[in-house]
Amino acid sequence: MRRGAGAPESGEPPSTSIRSIGERAGQEVALRGWLYQSRSSGKVAFLLVRDGTGIIQCVVSKAEVAEEVFEAARQATQESSVVVTGLVRRDDRAPGGYELSVTDFRTYQTAEEYPISPKEHGVDFLMSHRHLWLRSRRPHAVLSIRSTVVQALRMFFEREGFVLVDAPIFTPSAPEGTTTLFETEYFGGKAYLTQSGQLYMEAAAMAFGKVYCFGPTFRAEKHKTRRHLNEFWMLEPEMAWAGLEDVIDLSERMVVDAIRAVLEKRRRELETLERDPARLEAVRAPFPRLSYDEAIRVLNERGCSIEWGADIGGDEETVLAEGSEQPLFVHRFPRELKAFYMAPDPEDARLALGVDLLAPEGYGEIVGGGVRAESLDYLDEQIRKHGLPPEPLEWYRDLRRYGSVPHAGFGLGLERLIAWLTGIDHVRETIPFPRTMNRIYP
Ligand code: 4AD
Ligand code: MG
């Protein structure tokens, strides 16, 4: 059944969104949305209608509407697009606090049998229908929180005096090592999808002082863990005349501010996800700090046998985070474990001035960063040691030749932060259309 074009019909009451329907209590309104769920008896139909901003129960009573309106409401299929007119009534038992007493109902397009039913589906099935699954409560809540966090992060860096400088996606270089590059043909030559905007942010920091970029980054990692995506979003601030303490301080305040925004604006979504807000309310700066040396000692005390010099992987991160509600900074790693650009620790030449922030509850590393090597000689030595081709880094060397200064920054993995805040197990659910080793569809 298809009537009208979805545009307001003459005599139709004002349109509203479900989120702001409370402002129209006692009035007649029109809602444009989709039928989420319905049940009906011979006399009354209960429709859950969603419009993107919320879900509301609409009650169609046979005695109070025209025969064809009741039939249209009763027969509408799940996810049909609909225009519902009715009276807004306050009802404390209703999920959003309001209900609609329907006076008119029309179906704009009748949906075919919808593949996602209220019964349980496996994640793989749901991911293959991600384009439709987005309409369901859980993805809707997670992605709404993601939107709020991104907004809060941008505002945070704006307030802190950082300038947004966008980094390119096609690059000639491999800041995070040559083993995880996505290569692509570039007009007869080759280019890589960016692993990190950092090197460009270093150039920008020498021009603007404090900068950040925020965009998709790509790693051809053959990981199948709950923390890895092949395309993920990274926010990367970089500061001239700054050191390790500045990185720690800034990332700490950033995380606290993101949590504040979620607690302020997305309580309802946390509830939908059954995420206990007390977990987030408990997070307080300053976060505890542990040097790599201490971390190795703690890990061995807790039964992980790990030698000095070995990388702290996902499992070890979980062990380190155990028993604490707070995120944890781990700093000053063996130089060999870290990227070519990391500055050596002036107090211990074996170490690099890097820092990672580990989320509690086993969510792992959400931030990685540190101080960048200042001297051209040291940098050249590292480029050689890491076996990186020097030509694509020629421009980067210029930054050490023309007014080199101490500078530092970090990268925040957005999906890992969202996974932790929402309590979602796997990062693939925290990005609208995840790209993993075995998924590029839809
Ligand atoms: O620790 P990473 O590799 O650091 C860098 O790329 C630096 N160049 C950043 C900088 O200093 N400007 O990555 C930073 C963060 C990690 O802490 C993690 O949260 C996230 O990016 N990340 C991933 N998230 C999802 N899937 C992956 N495969 C990720 N790899 C890194
Ligand atoms: Mg890292």
Image: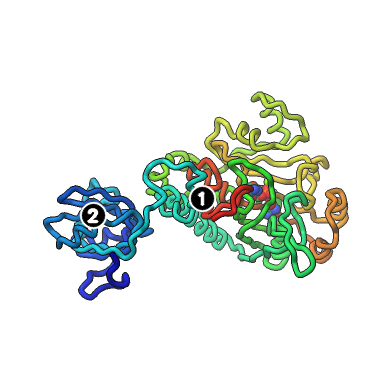
State which quadrant residue 289 falls in: top right
For the C terminus, the image quarter is bottom right
Residue occupying the far bottom of the picture: 10
Expressed as whole percent of the image width and height from the top left, the position of residue 130 reads 49, 52
Residue, x 49% and y 46% (percent of image)?
125
> Which of the two discs, 2 and 1, labels the residue nearer the N terminus?
2
Q: Is residue 132 left or right of residue 303?
A: left
Label 2, label 1: how far apart the Cα atoms are: 30 Å
Colour logic: rainbow
Please tell me the numbered disc located at residue 109. Answer: none
Q: Using residue 231 as the reference point, say whether residue 278 is left or right of it.
A: left
Up/down of 347 relative to 315, above or below? below
Mark 2 Cα-neighbour bin, 10 Å: few <14, some 14–19, many ≥20: many
Can see residue 245? no
Residue 50 image position (x, y, % from top left) = 34, 56
Task: Say what secondary structure mark 2 lies in.
Answer: helix
* Residue depicted at x 57% and y 40%: 363
Q: Which residue is mark 2?
A: 74
Do labels 2 and 1 touch, CB within 8 Å?
no
Q: Which residue is mark 1?
A: 128
Q: Where residue 178 appears, x then y in whole percent?
A: 77, 51
76 or 406, nearer to the observer: 76
Which residue is more in the foreground, 186 or 274?
186
The residue at 75%/67% (across/down) is 186
Residue nearer the viewer, 243 or 385: 385
Q: Residue at x 63, y 61 (%)?
A: 213
